[in-house]
Image (cartoon, grey):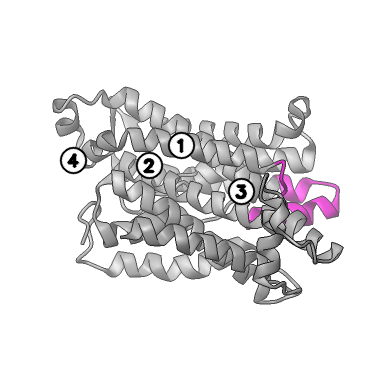
């Protein structure tokens, strides 16, 4: 049932999110402007909109809503993958230090112009590199005698996340350009302000590849929840699968952080909400999480734009205000256990 309802909710959420803002635009106008860019359907529109409406809808809000859709879906997928990887309900890319590592790389590009040789892909490359190195370091620190303890993994992730956050703050306060510092601080709290049509394909491809990979590996993710020994007994090459999973999730997280900054709690909340609704089979969890995350992020961005309009607050503030209480509720809800479903 959810698979039929959620795409409809997502579609209307997109149209309404584009229509809402300091300058309100009728949803029918939004729909017409979108149709005017669809081959063979552009003749159905009357083009009775103004240039200002066109620019607001097509150049500003549509890319932003689409980016929010992809970011929400991607963070939900990353959270689902990492929670299965470490078999812990409190894990997400933010808590394990992946986002903090990506932030270090991204701030080096924004403030100091590092990795210029990669051109427009410098930010994505640096964020991915930072995310990948942070994950490798967390796993190295948490591994003793070839075994990884979940407690050590989480503690290593939290410690490394704090260290990397301190490094990011040091880079920011050391930067000479005040405008860049303000931009970097706003970006670090999460924002979709930088959304444009050029950014969307990179994020979209990363989300699509990750979704296809995780969906193809749904059985392996289910086996991970059953424990290492059981997974190996049932034929899973656990060491290889873990490494590939880390690589894919790091790539996705790096691209997401490069596009939107470090947005916390989404990767933590959405998979849990979905498991509470439909159980823990990853074939269903991944697909439903994709839609839930996209819809949640679209409306979180609407709130970020409208709460103090015409001023805008970082979207990370909105997700934290929602995710913080959810996190506390999750900790105190004794009847819920990871993978336990309802």
Asked if 215 appears above or below 240 in the picture, the reply is below
Q: Residues within 10 Å of mark 1 (few under 14, many from 20)?
A: many
Q: Earlier in the sequence, mark 2 or mark 1?
A: 2
Nearest to viewer (mark 3 / mark 1)? 1
- Residue at point 30% right, 43% down? 283
Is residue 31 shown in magenta? no
Viewer-nearest residue: 150 or 10: 10
Is residue 173 shown in magenta? yes
Q: CA distance from mark 3 to mark 4?
A: 37 Å
What residue is disc 4 on? Answer: 226
What residue is disc 2 on? Answer: 81
Q: Which residues are magenta?
A: 171-198
- Residue at point 68% right, 64% down? 30
Q: Is residue 141 left or right of residue 129?
A: left
**Does the residue at mark 2 contact the one at mark 1 (Cβ under 8 Å)?**
yes
Q: Where residue 210 is drawn, which disc sits there?
A: 1
SS type, badge 4: loop
Q: Earlier in the sequence, mark 4 or mark 1?
A: 1
Q: CA distance from mark 3 to mark 1?
A: 30 Å
In the rendered image, the quadrant that contains the C terminus is bottom left
Q: Where residue 274 is drawn, which disc sits there?
A: none
What percent of the width, then of the height, locates residue 52?
Answer: 84, 65
Asked if 118 appears above or below 298 in the picture, the reply is above
Q: Where residue 166 is drawn, which disc sits there?
A: 3
Q: Earlier in the sequence, mark 2 or mark 3?
A: 2
Q: Earlier in the sequence, mark 3 or mark 1?
A: 3
């Amino acid at each position: 049932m959810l698979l039929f309802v959620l795409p409809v909710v997502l579609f209307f959420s997109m149209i309404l999110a584009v229509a809402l803002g300091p300058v309100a635009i009728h949803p029918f106008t939004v729909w017409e402007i979108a149709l005017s860019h669809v081959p063979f359907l552009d003749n159905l529109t009357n083009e009775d909109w103004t240039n200002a409406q066109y620019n607001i809808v097509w150049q500003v809000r549509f890319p932003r809503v689409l980016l929010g859709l992809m970011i929400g879906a991607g963070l939900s997928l990353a959270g689902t993958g990492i929670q299965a990887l470490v078999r812990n309900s409190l894990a997400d890319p933010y808590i394990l230090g992946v986002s903090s590592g990506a932030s270090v790389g991204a701030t080096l590009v924004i403030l100091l112009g590092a990795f210029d040789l990669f051109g427009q892909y410098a930010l994505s490359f640096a964020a991915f590199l930072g995310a990948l190195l942070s994950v490798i370091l967390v796993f190295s620190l948490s591994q003793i005698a070839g075994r990884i303890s979940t407690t050590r993994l989480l503690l290593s992730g939290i410690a490394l996340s704090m260290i990397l956050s301190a490094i990011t703050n040091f880079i920011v306060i050391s930067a000479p350009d005040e405008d860049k510092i303000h931009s970097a601080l706003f970006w670090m709290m999460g924002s979709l302000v930088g959304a444009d049509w050029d950014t969307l394909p990179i994020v979209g491809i990363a989300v699509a590849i990750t979704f296809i990979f995780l969906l193809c590996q749904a059985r392996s993710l289910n086996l991970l929840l059953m424990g290492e020994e059981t997974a190996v007994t049932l034929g899973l090459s656990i060491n290889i699968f873990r490494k590939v999973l880390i690589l894919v999730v790091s790539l996705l997280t790096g691209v997401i952080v490069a596009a939107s900054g470090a947005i916390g709690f989404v990767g933590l909340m959405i998979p849990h909400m979905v498991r509470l609704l439909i159980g823990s089979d990853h074939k269903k969890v991944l697909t439903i999480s994709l839609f839930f995350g996209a819809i949640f992020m679209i409306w979180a961005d609407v709130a970020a734009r409208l709460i103090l309009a015409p001023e805008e607050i970082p979207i990370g503030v909105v997700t934290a205000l929602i995710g913080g209480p959810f996190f506390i509720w999750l900790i105190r809800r004794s009847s819920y256990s990871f993978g336990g479903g309802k």
